[in-house]
Image (cartoon, rainbow, N blue to C red):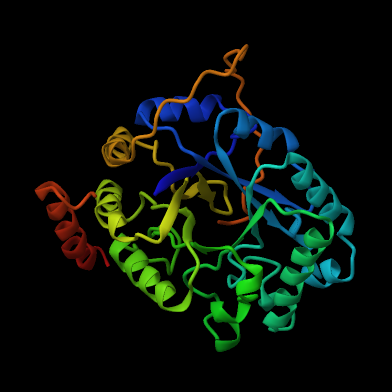
Amino acid sequence: MAWGIFESSAPRNFSPLTQLENQLDHQFRFLLLYKNLGSEFPRQELINARERDRHVVLTLQTEYLDKSLNNRSLYALLEGEHDHLLAAFAQGLKDFGDPVLFRLNNEMNGDWCSYSAYWSSMDTEVYLASWRYVYEYFEKAGVNNVIWVWNPHDDSFPGFAWNHYLTYYPGDDYVDLIGLTGYNPGTYFPGEPWRPFHEIYPPLYDEYMRLFQHPFIITEFGSNSHGGDKTQWIHAMFYHMPRFENIRVAIWWNGIDWDAAGNPGRIYKLDEAPEYVAAFREGLSRYKTPPLPPIPGEAADDETDSETDEEGTTGGADSEDAEAADEEDETGDTESE
């Protein structure tokens, strides 16, 4: 299994990511990148990643960051209003040539996404039609270097039968990788519980293994630091991860979800505190990758890049210490809840 990360400035600017990787003594092979209806095709970002031997998970969310413009998100797509964007992305991907993991409209079973059926007549057929529309548009354009990643959230919101994640599945012919996403949101926001790792991923993995024949990728996940022991959560994650043999990549979402007043609510950053960095460095040491060669003529770039296309919202079992960490996870979680 390989590791990846969402770090908001990468692959536009590698300086913050390089600083983090130096702390961890690990280089992330996969980078998560978000684009939306207001975005241009990220040609230079893909080239930057390729020059550093990284792979991009390109997420296209067919909505605007300005939520007031998303009243008819999927209907507009199906009526051809965004064909110019699809044409730019199709041509850009084709010209780029190398394989790109392409994640379209993730977490569609969450009502925070305008492309959820919650906003289109509670009818998941609209989502299915939109997925196939984009897939066939790319196919007609001759794009053959896209790896299609289908990625629901582990919980459906709202939890009605019409919004069950399987009702959004477009079919095996339209999907290459199955994405898993489940977060520990912590207890900052009312109604959100502390979710231990062993309560999220082992049952989710087992369920998906019964349903799908594809390889898996954890496209984004993380743990908040509010409401429990984040260091222990990280240790438990690395303890459990080796059993998931069908998961090929795991991508940590190294960001923050803010509340309405602009305060940090869900802090998923692994470099928030030295003890989190130490726990990650220890876990990642089991997944060593060879050092990357320097880029000829590359100058150090210390420029801070504030731009981001973030979402609108959102063999380690061989030591007694790891087993003890897992036991603490299972006992401590009950007390936390």
Residue at figure coordinates x 68%, y 77% from the top left:
117
Count of numbered labels shown in the rendering? 0
Residue at figure coordinates x 47%, y 44% from the top left:
4
In the image, residue 219 above or below residue 132: above
Q: Is residue 336 visible?
A: yes
Q: Is 14 displayed left or right of 23 in the figure? A: right
61 and 313: which is toward the camera? 61
Percent coordinates x, y for residue 143 in the rendering: 76, 53
Q: Is residue 158 visible?
A: no
Picture quarter with the C terminus: bottom left
Q: Is 213 displayed left or right of 231 in the figure? A: right
Q: Quadrant of residue 54?
A: top right
Residue at figure coordinates x 29%, y 64% from the top left:
198
Percent coordinates x, y for residue 11 in the rendering: 61, 34
Residue at figure coordinates x 65%, y 72% from the top left:
173
Percent coordinates x, y for residue 66 in the rendering: 76, 54
In the image, residue 80 above or below residue 122: above
Percent coordinates x, y for residue 50 in the rendering: 61, 33
Residue furthest out toward the bottom: 161
53 and 152: which is toward the camera? 53
Q: Is 334 displayed left or right of 47 in the figure? A: left
Q: Quadrant of residue 175?
A: bottom right
